[in-house]
Image (cartoon, rainbow, N blue to C red):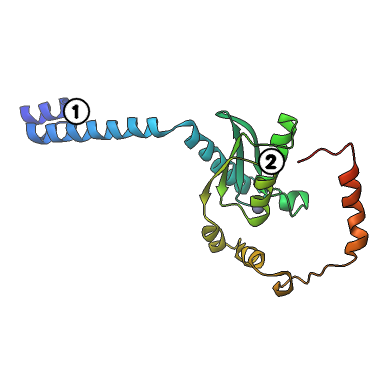
Amino acid sequence: MEDDLTGKLTVGHGGQSYQDSHAESGQKERQNQMVQEKAQQMTPETQFMATAISLATENVVSGRGGPFGAVVVRGGEVVATGINQVTTSNDPTAHAEVVAIRNACKVLGSFKLDDCVVYTSCEPCPMCLAAIYWARCKAVFYGNSAADAAKIGFDDQLFYEELKRSNADRELPMMQWMSQEAWESFSAWEKSPMRIEY
Ligand code: ZN
């Protein structure tokens, strides 16, 4: 009875030998260490990606759109975020990265994000990748891969394949037409004193 009572009183160690108890406390120490290490690993960069992922999930849960979120960061601080708004805004270009870039440019009052990094919940599609190039962002981190996206019905593979093909070989009919007339606007640009290079 005394043993039982002792066992009940020494919460967490009842019925265990010193070695067992010692082993358990060692395990707990290791667990605590792991938690601390994980907390330390929660760098700002990890948090930016976690934010992009949370935005993506929240977008689905709230019924606002596709499972995609993006964050634009400059100097270790979030400049702007974006979520997929294709279906809510009837805008096929409203992908999370494009929306985040637009928002970031508004915040910074600039068309260049050359000192910014993009954290996105999924590997950018060709359109978003091109937008990231146009914005001159300096790096991209992504969570899900394009292959992961394809598994749930977002297959950009065709677009990537199309980009590799010549104009004549693409599924989308494309032909050059009225190039001489079209040069007029380029000529105007070359002569324009108001042009702003970008
Ligand atoms: Zn995209």
| Amino acid on which disc 1 is placed | Val
Q: Are marks 1 and 2 in contact (CB under 8 Å)?
A: no
Q: For residue 11, which numbered disc appears in the image?
A: 1
Residue at the spot 59% in from the left edge and 46% down from the top edge = 56
Q: CA distance from mark 1 to mark 2?
A: 55 Å
Q: How many marks?
A: 2
Would you identify the image quadrant in which residue 32 lies? top left
| Left/right of residue 130 with respect to residue 2 in the rendered view | right
Mark 1 and mark 2 lie on one chain; the one further toward the N terminus is: 1
- Considering the image in quadrants, where does the C terminus appear? top right
Q: Is residue 197 left or right of residue 122?
A: right
The residue lying toward the viewer, choosing from 18 and 130, is 130
Kind of residue at badge 2:
Ile
57 or 137: nearer the eye?
A: 137
Under tag 2, what secondary structure? helix
Q: Residue at x 69, y 35 (%)?
A: 104
Residue 101 marker: 2
Residue positioned most to the front: 191
